[in-house]
Image: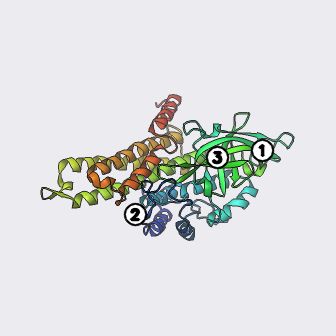
Amino acid sequence: MDFTFTEEQQAAVEAAKAVFGPVAPDSVPSPALTPGAVADDFDRALWSRLADADLLSLLLAAEHGGAGLDAIALCLVLRESAKALARVPLLEHTATAVAVQTYGSDELKEQILPRAARGELVLTAASAGRTGHDPAQLAVSARRDTGTGTGTGTGTGTGTWILDGTQTGVSWAHNADHIAVPAHTPQGRTVIAVLPHPHEGLSLAEQISTTGERLGELHLDSVHLAAHQIIETDEAWDRLHQLLTTGTCALALGLGERVLRMTGDYTSKREQFGYPVATFQAVAVQAADRYIDLRAMEATLWQAAWRISTQAGGALPAAGDIAVAKIWASEGVRRVVQTAQHLHGGFGADTDYPLHRYHAWAKQLELSLGPAAAHEETLGDLLAAHPLG
């Protein structure tokens, strides 16, 4: 097996380091210091630098202004973004653009992809469902407008669709130009509505995440969309959700790596009884355990990213590898930040020090797209359906 990254993937990492390296965690708005939302918008200046570095179009084909890379390259870039607590919708934007490129109508591709590649349009996805615990596709209903045609079932139908329902906790919804909304049809199929924002019948209520960022509670009241704005391919939502989940694991890994580095630097300088606390066995053992967590998070992440990039077969469907990666990411990033807080002592909770920001972001990532327990249940169902010989 060859576990090395390609030259193109490594080039993406170097470009990401150049963009995210100058971002100081101390400059990231703190939820502990800001009442309400930490900001009304994401970091537009950083977004522009990502566009200039061609990092918003990594996974798009050359015909749409992209580099044609894969999910592994995206995860490498997301890993770097999390180290800097980058306040940009890079994951949601890229995953939605890939879904449009792979499954969208020609009209939808022409409308969205070139401008999305340049960062002129911002895309996001609704993935939390109505309550954050139920499947996202069940939160919204989609039906064809009676008498407007039946379409072909391939995203190229005619007529209009009507959507009703509520999606909660939609990241960057207030600032996005299009929102990918999964919905269920009366026949039990799942479609994706690529919904322009603003749009008649769409309203947003403000919610605040653990990180202090604005989320949107999305209400759809008889929203009418043209057929070309609906992606009807059966597996489209599963693939989009898989990329979102795997990308979240990459964010957790990058955040955990930066936090462990911060902990190592602090304990190497902090002295007790005339010695750095890093030399104490109890401290070294705890740090070593967290290093093992990070290596497990990394191994399971690349396995999941490789499966969705190559569509390679395995003993279980790719969803199994993604579930394992998310279990490790959720549990691992929680343990890393908890240990960091412990080893920093009271300094870790000091709002003049950036660790509390990482702790808030870690909790958000731990629960995003389902906590570990939800993915353990998914994994159990997959194992029951696909017994290992």
Disc 3 marks which residue? 218
Left or right: residue 76 compared with residue 60? left
Distance from Cα at disc 3 to Cα at disc 2: 31 Å
Q: Which amino acid is tagged 1?
A: Trp
Where is 200 relative to 129, above or below? below
Disc 1 marks which residue? 161
**Residue 379 drawn at (x, y percent):** 48, 35
Would residue 305 be visible to someone looking at this image?
no
Q: Which amino acid is tagged 2?
A: Asp
Name which residue lies at 51% across and 34% down: 378
Name which residue lies at 49% across and 47% down: 304
**Residue 141 drawn at (x, y percent):** 70, 38
Tell whether label 1 touches label 2 (CB within 8 Å): no
Name which residue lies at 48% across and 57% down: 78
- Numbered disc in front, either 2 or 1: 2
Disc 2 marks which residue? 26
Would residue 341 be visible to someone looking at this image?
yes
Distance from Cα at disc 2 to Cα at disc 1: 46 Å
Secondary structure type for disc 1? strand
Secondary structure type for disc 2? helix
Distance from Cα at disc 3 to Cα at disc 1: 18 Å
- Front-lying residue, 267 or 301: 267
Mark 2 or 1 closer to N-term? 2
